[in-house]
Image (cartoon, helix red, strand yellow):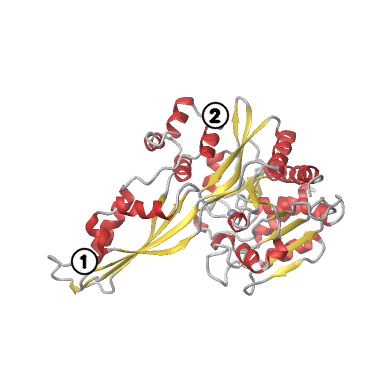
Amino acid sequence: MTTQTISLLQEMIRNRCVNDGTPDSGFEHRSVKTLIDYFGRAGEIIEPHPGRQNLLYRIPGTHPGAPALTLLPHLDVVPVTEKSWRNDPFGGEIIDGYVWGRGAVDMLNLTAAMAAVFKRYLTGELPPLPGDLVFAAVADEEAGGRYGAGHLVEEHWDLVECDYLLTEVATPGFRTAAGLTLPVTVAEKGPAWRSLRLAGTPGHGSQPYRTDNALIGMAGAILQLANTPTPVDISPSWIEFITAIGLPGDLVARLIDPDLIDGAIDELDDPDFARWVHACTHLTVAPTLLEAGEKQNTIPDLGKASLDVRVTPGQDRATVDDMFRKALDPGLLERIEIIDDLDFPANESQAEGPLWDAIQAAANELAGPTTLVPMLTPVLTDGRFFRQRGVTAYGVGLFEDDMRFAGALSMFHGNNERVGVGSVTLTENLIDATVAQFGQRIGGEQ
Ligand SMILES: [Zn+2]
């Protein structure tokens, strides 16, 4: 069974379902075909754009009204810079015990594990759960889900309707004196994307003195934003997370103190971990696009910039507005137009209830005494569409000790993405035990 799961993962990597953000990329129909062949039976296909296929199955529960569980993996992956990889990013090769390729940790490992577990219910090897069990392998997660989970929730809610959901993000845990501390993704930050526009006055590039150059103004604004510390949010779940992962006590004390945290992050050695800690506790601003001018000998009269701004569950639009007021000097603030491009609130599920308890029991069974900790992810996942409908959505996996938390983070969308064969098996076993435990726990609920 494990061999089949690994073969499935390898084939999905080789399918190159690369989503570059354009409608005609993605090619998820390739992995939909792979999954149908693997399951040996047809499912429902929703294709909002040619090639952008989503594959769905629903196994009715035995107790009408019992809570439903959906497994929601995505099929698409992000592009690669091929020359920066040590091995073929779409070869799906097994080298020294690792499956190599784009998607190995984001998230085809989980997709393969969830498919392996679901197949046992689909083929009748395992009896149905009290509530419905849904499998929805979706397109377009990596570009916002408009052909995938977003489309399904808006247009086909009856197909994906559920009370509980398993999706991403799955990360390795931490070994502490007390045993394994395993993060469960329960929350994600919200995008508050903004564009800036600044008008100047055109002039001849040969005489720049005292001109109103929009490029210089916009460059100044970007630097002010980059150099101003952003608002901190120390949430109860952050405190629970950072306290449980085995860091020295004095460091933890500073990482939960809004006044000391920035200095403490500066001192963290591992840049991947520092970046994560910063993002989980701050409003972040990343300038991503800059545009001005049309001709090399003309003073530009318009500057445009795009910012990827993200807020925590404790922050909102007012926090964003306030950040701009503090960062930009009053003269610039008055002249710059700030445009809302995208606002999706940060969202969070409670770390309690039958699915949480099921993961806890499954982890104890497979990894010994385990402390589950709620984790916020700074990235967008498909979980957000479901949390908005009141669904409890988590992401979790289980990895061998050779995969470390920060090391795995750097592989998401990074070079040399790979996952240990043993880790895929552990994740499959965790999902398997979690679904079974969930079924036992909701047996009596109506
Ligand atoms: Zn992903």
Residue at x 67%, y 71% (from the top left corner): 47
Residue 380, placed above or below residue 29: above
> Left or right: 393 with respect to 299?
right
Circle 2 SS class:
loop
- Residues 6 and 75: in front is 75
Which residue extends farthest front? 446
Q: Quadrant of ligand 1?
A: bottom right
Q: Position of residue 77 (x, y in %)?
A: 59, 59
Residue at x 82%, y 62% (from the top left corner): 40
Can you identify the residue that label 2 sits on? 246
What's under tag 1, amino acid-wise? Answer: Asn
Mark 1, residues whose alpha carbon is within 10 Å: few (<14), some, or many (≥20)? many
Residue at x 56%, y 71% (from the top left corner): 23
Q: Quadrant of residue 278?
A: top left
> Exactly how many numbered labels are in the figure?
2
Q: State which tag comes first along the sequence, 1 or 2.
A: 1
Camera sees residue 93: no
Q: Position of residue 166 (x, y in %)?
A: 67, 50
Can you identify the residue that label 1 sits on? 213
Q: Position of residue 70 (x, y in %)?
A: 71, 55
Mark 2, residues whose alpha carbon is within 10 Å: few (<14), some, or many (≥20)? some
Callout 1: CB less than 8 Å from ligand 1 = no
Q: Quadrant of residue 217?
A: bottom left
Circle 1 SS class:
loop
Camera sees residue 173: yes
What's under tag 2, amino acid-wise? Answer: Gly
Residue at x 21%, y 66% (from the top left corner): 213
Residue 267, placed above or below residue 80: above
- Whole-angstrom CA distance, mark 1 to mark 2, is 52 Å
Q: Position of residue 268 (x, y in %)?
A: 43, 35
> Left or right: 270 with respect to 429?
left
